[in-house]
Amino acid sequence: MTRRRSPAMNESTHEQDQTTPFRGPTHPAATSRSIDEFYNVAHEQGNSGGRFHYWLLFLALGVANSGDATEIGCMNYILSHPLFKEEILAYRTVAVGEEDYGGRGAAVASSIFAGMLFGGVITGAYGDRLGRRPTLLAGLFLNGCSGISSSLAPTAAVMCLCRFCAGLGIGAVLSSLITLASELSPSAHRGWYITFVGGFWTLGSCFIALLAYILFGLNNYSWRIFVLIAASPTLLGGVLVWALVPESPRYLALHGRYEEAAKVANDVAGAMGYVGTEITVKEIRDHFGHMADSKHGPSLEDKQAMKKIGELYRKDLAFTVTIPLQIVWISMSFGSGVCTWITKLFEEIGLSNIYLQSLYFALANIPGNLAATFLVDRVGRKALLFGSMAMASLSLGLAAHGASKADAGQLQVIISSCSFHSFLVMGWCALSVMTSELFPTSIRGTGMGVCAGVGRLAGILVQYVNGAFIDKPLVLLLTAASCLMTGAFAPIVLKMPDMTDKHLSEIPGKAIGVLEGNGQAIHKIV
């Protein structure tokens, strides 16, 4: 990012440009552009061949996202590793040759989701005051260090503690990463860029599956080496975010830091290849001056954080945004619980070479992510979410049917499982975009954190359900399918709005300009 001008130069530019007012949605001042409007023009008029630094920004966010995928996904493969069973699951508690999947296995698998619950809620609330970028960096650092520590864990209790701390870091990352991506992208292409960042989850999943196949399927390496390598994408993501990703200009503006907000917004536009009129400090102040937070002491910040959580359940948000999203997060997290136990599930069904089948399962992410990238801005978020969840549910039903046929249904199980994973990642992409868009900027991080936290409650519960029913694959698969189908209908029944091709709102309960598909602006209450 190279376009840098002082506040004075920005003010001067604004004064010289008074004779050529900006054409488009104009609120609150006739000649003032919002950050969304500025980004849309910058993206449209920018040199597409000169967006290298803009792509680097989202690449850094993507690598950070892939680190979360590898850290969560590594548990999928070590639950069935012989040495992990011996050293962790059967250590000093059960008879030799037996594994405590319903107790220790479920505890180890769920501990990361418990950490994600607390990490998401806490950093979601405080991240709206501390900043997106610091929250993201802190989460990546904690996640990476905890992943390394997990490789040294001598007992199940220590393993649970390390996984819990990793979950704290992942919760911080998830509550800030997608929020930051949404606030650094133009509204007309926001779904595409968020899905691009989300696509790195697929790359992380494929990387960890390939690593498991190489270390476990083709060789006989220790699970500790596997867990140690799994922490590397998180550490790389932290370095890239620190070097390449700026703070959100919306966050800066909402906290009264108008000069910094204008500078970052112009730097981001410059990274898009834009060389037109820069957004000015005055324009930022026009749009955010009446919304800006003042600085408070720690005790008042605690009250503000709790107030932000309370604002999620205001009358105008609770029943059309917050609660429907939480239902979907619960359903998706419950359905995704199958992934944590996939190698053990394949083992129970009787599939041969379970690590190779798990690699196929992970690779199924790729067509799902590509489809989501193509469809999210075309068919709309809500339609994509419903279709993806419904098809994922039906795929699990087919997998359950194949599992009931013993050897004759093995191919059906593999194909249906891959289909399920493909549709599941499509659903997660749509849900990530919807969650980041539907909450106003002032509580967006809080909303992401709370919704993810509620989903983690389901993630914790499902580990114990799956641990108890791991020897009954048919019951496990049908339970997950039912949860996904229930969640698919929640946004439709509860009439959740769709923000496809619309501007983000800034604060709850205020009139904002919403860019409709025909490019006209309307004012409405959010």
Image: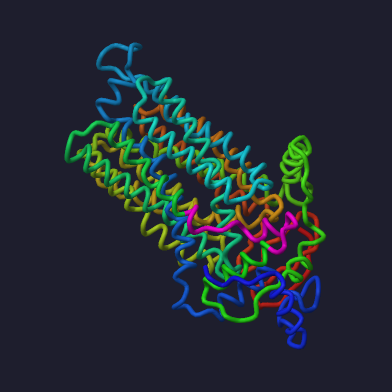
Q: Is residue 270 above or below residue 74?
A: below
Give the residue at x 38% y 47%: 233
Residue extent of the magenta highlight: 241-259
Predominant secondary structure, magenta span: helix
**In the depicted view, which residue is nearer to us: 418 or 291?**
291
Q: Assign the C terminus to one quadrant of the image.
A: bottom right
Whether 254 is among the magenta residues is: yes
Give the residue at x 46% y 25%: 161
In this rendering, position of residue 219 left or right of residue 500: left
Q: Is residue 372 visible?
A: yes
Image location (x, y in percent) of residue 365: 37, 53
Q: Is residue 324 visible?
A: no
Give the residue at x 52% y 58%: 245
Image location (x, y in percent) of residue 296: 78, 43
Where, by quadrant of the figure, is residue 450 drawn?
top right
Whether 52 is among the magenta residues is: no
Image location (x, y in percent) of residue 150: 38, 30
Image location (x, y in percent) of residue 285: 77, 66
